[in-house]
């Protein structure tokens, strides 16, 4: 929820600055405050103090007629519950905080600490003096050739995270429902992303090449690259450095598989034609002049299922690529035959799948919509996390 105020209401905040200057009890706040041309910057550790003074000023200005709770005062001041965090850098002094937006002419005129420079958004910038970094245990920060490096002590040794890897991970988790639900702070700043990434890397375990899991093509063909897993997150490691992060679920899995197929040899895709990356449809077959489209989610579900299968005839023997997985998916889908819903109803309900028609190959069910687009795919014989037992 965002609380927007009229321009004239916000302009009155300049009177609030005058109040702070003349109020002796507000002097403790001033080292944590800076007046900017774009508003009032306050250190995150002094937010509650600022809100309390704002409430006192509001009551004084309204002669006791207006009362706002601390929560509503915060939302009004910062125009929302989750304002963007910024760095304010004055030489060696680094402050991390938020801006109360209001246009201020000549910030110097109020006799308060002011700042005429530019702020750095904590969403896109990571300052080595950020106080939150000190909360990450056993991490050494260094300045490398390509930017900051974070050397993480783990039980198996030291793993290195470069700044680019952190930025890429920050972009990755913006599409992650898991992170949105469990670690929302990690999506708001690079420092928050680093904290989560460090925790995941520490939890991660090396995966042997004999384990059946989809990997980037360059990993399978490399003698120096390996993978580590922590939950649904895969990390590509080479010579003690984390090179890349991949989330093996949801939209991020679909995006990874699609990107890998774009670089696959043409013969591995057969007659299948990929569509542009921004679309939900991964691609299509053209059969007798008609298109049979495939949704990206259907292939991602197949990859998850075949990764979990215990059937030796279906399972890959060790690392496999998205293209190799697609060959199997494509073959089974094209060999599948129509089946009546009542024959597979319990499985369809167990997986929460809805379709206009269904095809079956072995234990694999393919659900199609009205336009004959393949939208879902699941193995009725494979137990997935969160699904009930007992359906067949």
Image (cartoon, grey):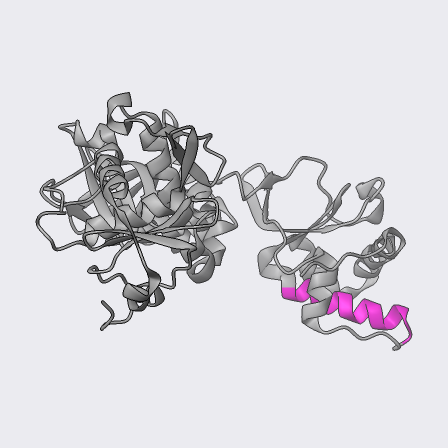
80 vs 5, left or right, is left
Q: Nearer the viewer, residue 176 or 253?
A: 253
Q: Position of residue 367 (x, y in %)?
A: 36, 52
307 vs 52, left or right, is left
Magenta segment includes 203: no
Q: Position of residue 355 (x, y in %)?
A: 42, 56
Residue positioned 32% across, 31% down in the render: 261
Label tally:
0
Q: Nearer the viewer, residue 117 or 92?
A: 117
Is any atom of residue 320 visible in this view?
yes
Q: Position of residue 274 (x, y in %)?
A: 39, 29
Q: Is residue 24 above or below residue 114?
A: below
Q: Is residue 41 above or below residue 60?
A: above
- The main secondary structure of the magenta stretch is helix
Outermost bottom residue: 64
Q: Is residue 108 above or below residue 269?
A: below
Magenta segment includes 50: yes
Residue positioned 57% across, 49% down in the render: 96
Q: Which quarter of the image is occupied by the N terminus?
A: bottom right
Residue positioned 77% across, 70% down in the render: 55
Is any atom of residue 149 visible in this view?
no
Residue stretch rendered in magenta on the structure: 48-63
141 vs 116, left or right, is left
Q: Nearer the viewer, residue 189 or 54?
A: 189
Corner quadrant of residue 168: top left
Q: Which quarter of the image is occupied by the C terminus?
A: bottom left
Q: Is residue 247 above or below residue 273?
A: below
Q: Position of residue 334 (x, y in %)?
A: 27, 39
Outermost top residue: 266
């Amino acid at each position: 929820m965002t609380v927007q105020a009229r321009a004239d209401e916000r302009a009155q905040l300049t009177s609030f600055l005058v109040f702070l200057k003349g109020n002796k009890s507000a002097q403790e706040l001033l080292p944590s405050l800076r007046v900017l041309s774009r508003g009032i910057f306050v250190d995150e550790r002094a937010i509650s103090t600022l809100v309390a003074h704002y409430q006192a000023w509001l009551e004084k200005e309204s002669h006791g007629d207006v009362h706002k709770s601390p929560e509503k005062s915060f939302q009004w001041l910062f125009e929302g519950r989750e304002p963007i965090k910024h760095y304010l850098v004055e030489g060696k002094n680094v402050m991390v905080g938020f801006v109360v937006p209001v246009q201020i002419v000549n910030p110097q005129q109020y006799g308060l600490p002011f700042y005429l420079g530019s702020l750095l958004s904590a969403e896109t910038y990571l300052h080595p003096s950020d106080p939150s970094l000190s909360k990450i245990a056993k991490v050494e920060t260094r300045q490398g050739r390509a930017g900051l490096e974070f050397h993480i002590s783990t039980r198996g040794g030291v793993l290195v995270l470069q700044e680019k890897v952190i930025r890429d991970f920050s972009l990755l988790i913006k599409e992650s429902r898991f992170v949105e639900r469990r670690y929302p702070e990690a999506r708001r700043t690079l420092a928050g992303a680093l904290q989560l990434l460090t925790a995941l890397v520490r939890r991660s375990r090396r995966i042997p090449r004999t384990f059946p899991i989809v990997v980037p093509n360059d990993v399978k063909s490399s003698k120096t690259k390996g993978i580590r897993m922590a939950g649904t997150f895969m990390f590509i490691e080479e010579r003690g450095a984390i090179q890349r992060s991949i989330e093996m679920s949801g939209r991020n899995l679909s995006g990874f598989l699609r990107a890998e197929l774009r670089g696959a040899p043409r013969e591995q895709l057969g007659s299948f034609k990929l569509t542009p990356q921004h679309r939900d449809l991964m691609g299509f077959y053209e059969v007798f002049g008609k298109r049979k489209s495939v949704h990206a989610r259907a292939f991602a579900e197949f990859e998850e299922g075949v990764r979990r299968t215990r059937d030796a005839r279906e399972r890959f023997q060790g690392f496999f690529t998205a293209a190799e997985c697609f060959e199997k998916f494509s073959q089974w889908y094209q060999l599948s035959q129509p089946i009546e819903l009542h024959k597979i109803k319990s499985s369809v309900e167990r997986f929460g799948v809805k379709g206009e028609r269904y095809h079956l190959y072995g234990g694999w069910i393919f659900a199609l919509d009205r336009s004959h687009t393949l939208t879902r795919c699941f193995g009725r014989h494979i137990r997935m996390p969160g699904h009930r037992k007992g359906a067949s």
